[in-house]
Image (tube, grey):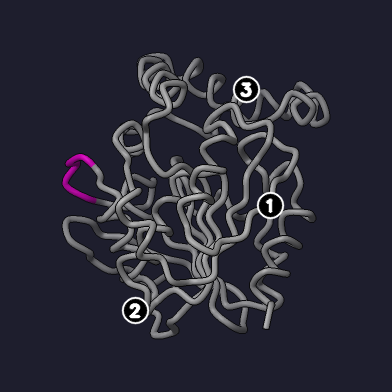
Amino acid sequence: MPKLTVGNATISYRVEGSGPVLVLVHGAGPGSIMWDGVLDRFTDRHTVLLPDLAGSDPAEDDGSPLTIEALAGQVAAVIEDSGTGPADVVGFSLGAPTVAAAAALRPNLVRRLVPIAGLPHAGDEYVRQYMTAWLNLAGTPEGFGRFATVTAYSRQFLNQIGHDAVEQAHAFMRPTDGLLRQIDLVRRIDIRPLLPRIEAPTLVIGATRDQTIPVENHRELFAGIRGSDYAELDTGHVAMAERPDEFAKLVRDFLHQA
């Protein structure tokens, strides 16, 4: 697994599949493993790069507050290190403003851009209160994980997968120092000055039942990127888990446009 130092962080990335390069950028949480459930829907046509950015479990840094510019720089460094740019870049949740910032700051490295369930800034009082409440649960790991689970998915999906699966899902989000710093970044984020600099064709994907970052934020991100396209999935925050086939088709159709 390639490993590189970018600024104050040492990060790694996985390489899967073959074909044109696609970078999948994770949101707040343990790291790139959050893509594993849909990975096989892309590796048949793409060489997929899966970075684990600062704040994720595999990454190491000095523990200082995270910035969106630093995360965007890590995405750019992975593309450069792989020697395969420009690449198609997809980012989920915190990964959405991260990849948007990367496209704005390093337009030569991003061919097409897909931000999913993201936000352009932290001005939504709901988002600020949500992230603060989540941080306040850090001292009770079970409560921290339950809060993340019940708000990450729609009510319909939770009932669909059933009680045992929901109980098992709580362990996915643990209050590590890295995750707490990622959540803190969401409370401070503002990429609005960067959005006019995005040149790559862009598809913004929203999630209508999102309780983590409500869909109005996804729509605002779309409105800020000139000439971008927009699509919505009737899901909770983790759209690729609730509607994997529909999600993958949206992304693949957009990436394969002439």
Q: CA distance from mark 1 to mark 3?
A: 24 Å
What is the quadrant of residue 171 in the picture? top right
Q: At 47% from the left edge and 46% from the top edge, which residue is drawn?
A: 27
Is residue 2 located in the magenta-colored stretch of the structure? no
- Going by the image, does 190 lie left or right of 145? left
Q: How many marks?
A: 3
Can residue 179 be spotted in the picture? no
Q: CA distance from mark 2 to mark 3?
A: 38 Å
Amino acid tagged 1:
Ala
For marks 2 and 3, the one nearer the N-term is 2
What span is in magenta? 61-65
> Where is mark 3, residue-wise?
150
Q: At 54% from the left edge and 26% from the top edge, which residue is drawn?
A: 148
> Where is mark 1, residue-wise?
231
For marks 1 and 3, the one nearer the N-term is 3
For the N terminus, the image quarter is bottom left
Amino acid tagged 2:
Glu
Please state which of residues 23 and 249 is positioned toward the viewer in this rendering: 249
Question: Element at badge 1?
Answer: strand
Is residue 62 located in the magenta-colored stretch of the structure? yes
Point out residue 37 in the picture as x, y percentages from the top left corner.
67, 52
Q: Is residue 171 above or below residue 47?
A: above
> Where is mark 2, residue-wise?
80
Point out residue 223 in the picture as x, y percentages from the top left corner.
51, 50
For marks 1 and 2, the one nearer the N-term is 2
Q: Label 2 crowding class (10 Å Cα cut-off): few <14, some 14-19, many 20+?
A: some
Q: Closer to the observer: label 1 or label 3?
A: 1
- Whether tag 1 and tag 3 are in contact, CB under 8 A, the answer is no
Point out residue 69 in the picture as x, y percentages from the top left corner.
26, 55
Point out residue 248 in the picture as x, y percentages from the top left corner.
72, 60
Amino acid tagged 3:
Val
Q: Label 1 crowding class (10 Å Cα cut-off): few <14, some 14-19, many 20+?
A: some
